[in-house]
Image (tube, coloured by chain):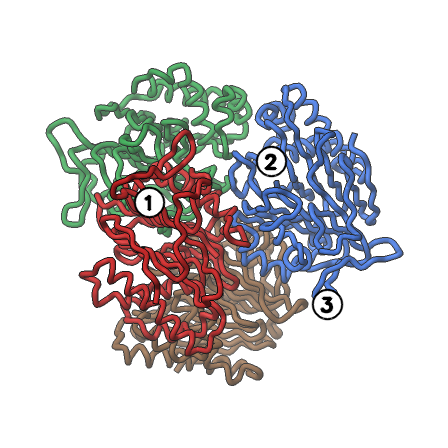
Chain colours: A red, B blue, C brown, D green
Amino acid sequence: MCRFLIYKGREMFMSDLITKPEQSLIRQSFKARERQEPLNGDGFGVGWYMPEIDLTPCVYNDLRPAWANRNLHRLADKIRSTCLFAHVRAASGGMSVSEANCHPFEYDRFLWMHNGGVAEFRKIKRRLRASLDDEYYDLIQGTTDSEHIFALFLNSLAPHMQDYSSQILAETMVATIMQLNDWSKNAGIERMSRYNFAVTDGQNIIATRYVTDASVEPHSLYYASGDAFEAVEGSYRMRPTERHPRTVIIASEPLTEERGYWTAVPANHLVMVTPELHIRVQPIS
Amino acid sequence: MCRFLIYKGREMFMSDLITKPEQSLIRQSFKARERQEPLNGDGFGVGWYMPEIDLTPCVYNDLRPAWANRNLHRLADKIRSTCLFAHVRAASGGMSVSEANCHPFEYDRFLWMHNGGVAEFRKIKRRLRASLDDEYYDLIQGTTDSEHIFALFLNSLAPHMQDYSSQILAETMVATIMQLNDWSKNAGIERMSRYNFAVTDGQNIIATRYVTDASVEPHSLYYASGDAFEAVEGSYRMRPTERHPRTVIIASEPLTEERGYWTAVPANHLVMVTPELHIRVQPIS
Amino acid sequence: MCRFLIYKGREMFMSDLITKPEQSLIRQSFKARERQEPLNGDGFGVGWYMPEIDLTPCVYNDLRPAWANRNLHRLADKIRSTCLFAHVRAASGGMSVSEANCHPFEYDRFLWMHNGGVAEFRKIKRRLRASLDDEYYDLIQGTTDSEHIFALFLNSLAPHMQDYSSQILAETMVATIMQLNDWSKNAGIERMSRYNFAVTDGQNIIATRYVTDASVEPHSLYYASGDAFEAVEGSYRMRPTERHPRTVIIASEPLTEERGYWTAVPANHLVMVTPELHIRVQPIS
Amino acid sequence: MCRFLIYKGREMFMSDLITKPEQSLIRQSFKARERQEPLNGDGFGVGWYMPEIDLTPCVYNDLRPAWANRNLHRLADKIRSTCLFAHVRAASGGMSVSEANCHPFEYDRFLWMHNGGVAEFRKIKRRLRASLDDEYYDLIQGTTDSEHIFALFLNSLAPHMQDYSSQILAETMVATIMQLNDWSKNAGIERMSRYNFAVTDGQNIIATRYVTDASVEPHSLYYASGDAFEAVEGSYRMRPTERHPRTVIIASEPLTEERGYWTAVPANHLVMVTPELHIRVQPIS
């Protein structure tokens, strides 16, 4: 299991999201709450957009645990962004710890993260790879199911790559999950898979909370929106607004002790955030 | 806080001590039991003796967590030793994660480990360094209190370096602790320090369980002895013997679920193991 | 380009092969002679056999350059073996530096190394992968052409896996190269590929010196044999013997200044070493 | 030996200084020209100022060679600065490769780099440390002579810390070198030391080119100034100006093939750059 964090809104320092809040992603990396194994020490990654420079994200990742990474702490204090993806990883059983396996994965303007896993992935891996155009086949550098599914998502999005809406991204995400379900069924896989995916192009965001077995709780996923996410007397909070929100956070766990303004994404639903920060929650089906 | 393990006895594979047992040191590195913060992910080290080659130990250490270290797992499956020190580290607050700060520290035939810390170490650091002969001053490569105290121990042992008994090692250890206590008192340090130290030359072993405040429990420390430490139907145990033991293990935590044959070292005592595997427990005072 | 070293013979310390000789592999890692770019700083690996323990090799690799790796130096001083593969890597243009891309690659009893590259590998990569049985397909953890070709070699060897001779290994190696040539031709690849491969099971060794363009010199490859490889007054040499050799070294470059007893493998030939240390040089065709 | 680079002027992308120019610092890291051992693969560091955020620099360093560091390449493409220090390291003989030993060293607003070394540093190390106030003594995290000398420089600057000019920085630098010379003489050190130091507070820069033996050439050091350092048709150059320069670069080696506008700093001189980009060259004596 892993933990991830998504931010979109006013320009903020990375540290106000990933190192300073009470239940920050860094803290989740060694003391996650909503999971049994509390440890995410098998590498981390953060990707962020600086639209004043260009449309592609900058990614920083490392195999060493986030909590001890001085570079991460120093960069977080100086780098500001309006859109950020961050991920701490707990390598699943057999998977290796390598930079090629660190989330978020990137392609052109896109970033992709995953919390969960495809049960018995090797049984559908060859089928998945065979379905990819060379462009996306050649992207794959590591061995994770997560990166393979990113390639699958991009392959499905390809016809719309020059012109798509938030809704098309959401539909492509749903189609990706349905495709995985089909292949898993055909391969006779009966064990449960969990698909908390997140994708962004720096403007639109789609994040899913999904499990293939409806009798089971998916991995946790929350979102919150407001005017700004800020520290007041040392304690972080989302400043509420009566008007259109200027800040959205989606995260595996609430970043604050105060949980009132954090909404759990319903099981087998996705959250869509548009470039104008409209938030929509839709079923995945 | 950290966790450590000491083995002396029949030649054993490293894996039978640090990767395979139920509550192995590797497991303690991400799920220690007898401490509040269960995580020791800031580097590890292992040192072992191969007397058929020479008298100095071989040390392998790494900054990345022990649990994800493929090299460690592969070496552990192939390397055998009759005397081994292993340590997983949780970097204390301000201390940096670097190879120079990984235990065990080595000098000539000696290995040294520490679980605990000197309160407000910087207040006595200059005094400690000033007391060292160049030979031991120049050993210090890192910034830990632990390594500095090793240099202090060696400096005290220097007059006996060519000819010492287990008892002299034990007395030097006690003198080292008393010296730290004196300096701490003179520096006006009132906070408590914890000194679970371990030293070996491949033949003799001294391990302490000590805290400067008698009203407080020191960090845990256990030992067990028997004929052999071995897996029986997949479960490790110490095979008992009515005769002289051929195997001794000293560890921050028992390596097995079965705790019956693990003896807690009393507070502010040390365990001495002689080359002939005689075990003595003595008060530190 | 990379550099590699193969040893088989009397039990030797790793250090006498990879760190101490004048032109040791470590030295080749920062100052190779017979190549234009003298640097091999993108990771290294060493695999060795300890037949007194079992038939599979132990592998130690790391992304950091071999010359600065304290663990490597310490292990090399204490570990002895009768059969060793070692490799220092210069990552080719687009390829990433990751542990999964470090040679030697291992599978069961086998180790594999490569110095060279498949021109435009991505044009035949899917074809190659499609040809593999699941058993060998699932082995692939990284992105190098080298690891893919190892899987191809194993796939070809599979029918003989329980019973093969040196000659069958050599024929499988030749078949592997011929297969690559076929696929490259079919894919319209005209650029030259270099295939200095090495494979061992701890008993037999096959090493090739091959380039697809006969008008070009392949990467260098030498071998030497004798009674023992040893230091005499600080300088390493192969002690000659009139009888059957007890030591064979195959290396990208001679390990000693004295080059008299190093024989260059002819272009597009392979060297076979049998379990009894018989050495045969055969054309690849 | 090492290589370093200093930039001050218009806001520039890091990549235009350290990764893209023909003879960039990255290239110098594996193929330095003006030195015998061409390799600087033992870690690197870069520090830069973002005055729109605050006065302290951001530092990114890593033990792995700069040339293979994907994070460095990605950050360099997105980060802009008006003042930058960068350093690639070749660890001297006995010194260890650790993050604590990576340049530039930082303290508050200051960055410090060194190319060279103190001969027989251990003979003056204790004397140097004893001279430091606790504030600067406690800074020292590693084992390099370079970091110790930075502490010595800061200790000398302490009385002026709240109010100093470029000239005072230059005088403190000269006093630091003279102090080293005194101690070395008193310690009976006869071997030559090389002191190419650089210090900045983000506004002022001092860089020295110095060797203790006047009959020997110091390590190389160049500077260039102009209107802007920019790529013209893929090739970098310093755009000249008839007016006051808006860009200054000081570097161990020219960054461009064209060397006409690079001025060698004379032996045993320093270059001072003021906040207004006035450049002065002064003798060290």
C-alpha span from label 3 to label 1: 55 Å
A33 horizontally vs D106: left or right: right
Residue that sits furthest to the front in the current view: A242
Q: Nearer the viewer, mark 3 or mark 2?
A: 3
The residue beneath circle 3 is B233
Q: From the viewer's perspective, is B227 left or right of C88?
A: right
Q: Residue at 32%, 65% (x, y): give it.
A: A174
Near mark 2 (Cα within 10 A), the count class, few <14, some 14-19 or many ≥20, is some
Image quadrant holding the C terminus of chain B, namely: top right
The amino acid beneath tag 3 is Glu
In front of the other: C265 or B134: B134
Residue that numbered label 2 is attached to: B139
Residue D60 seen in this snapshot? yes
As displayed, is residue D256 above or below residue C153?
Answer: above
Query: Which chain does the residue under circle 3 lie in?
Result: B
- Contact between marks 3 and 2 (CB within 8 A): the answer is no
